[in-house]
Amino acid sequence: MSRRFTPHIVAVLTGVASGVYIFKPLLEEAAANRNPIPPMNASTTSPGVPGKSPASSPSPHSSAK
């Protein structure tokens, strides 16, 4: 019975080992280059307008009644 599964087990182990060998450097590089995302709150500045906080910008629907 084990003779039937031995080639499958060897193939799976070879595939996993080669996948780790191939993709580990790429994943480590991507993790090192990833920038942390700052938390979004009212005290942060708007990325589109420097120096202007998002809480101070008027809502486009504030005057429509």
Image: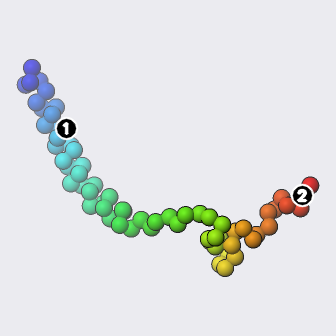
Q: Which kind of residue does numbered mark 1 sit on?
A: Val
Label 1 secondary element = helix
Rendering colour mode:
rainbow
Question: Measuring 55% from the left and 64% from the top, which residue is drawn there?
Answer: 39
- Give the image quarter of residue 41: bottom right
Q: Where is residue 19 shown, x and y percent of the image?
A: 24, 49
- In the picture of the structure, the residue carrying the numbered disc 2 is 64
Name the residue: 85% across, 61% down.
62
Regarding residue 48, the answer to whether it shows in the image is no
Mark 1, Cα crowd under 10 Å, few <14 / some 14-19 / many 20+, is few
Would residue 15 be visible to someone looking at this image? Answer: yes
In depth, the one of 27 and 46 nearer the eye is 46
Residue at point 18%, 47% (across, down): 17
Q: Position of residue 8 (x, y in %)?
A: 16, 31
Is 60 above or below relative to 49? above
Return the x and y of residue 53 as percentages of the image width and height: 69, 73
Residue on which disc 1 sits: 12
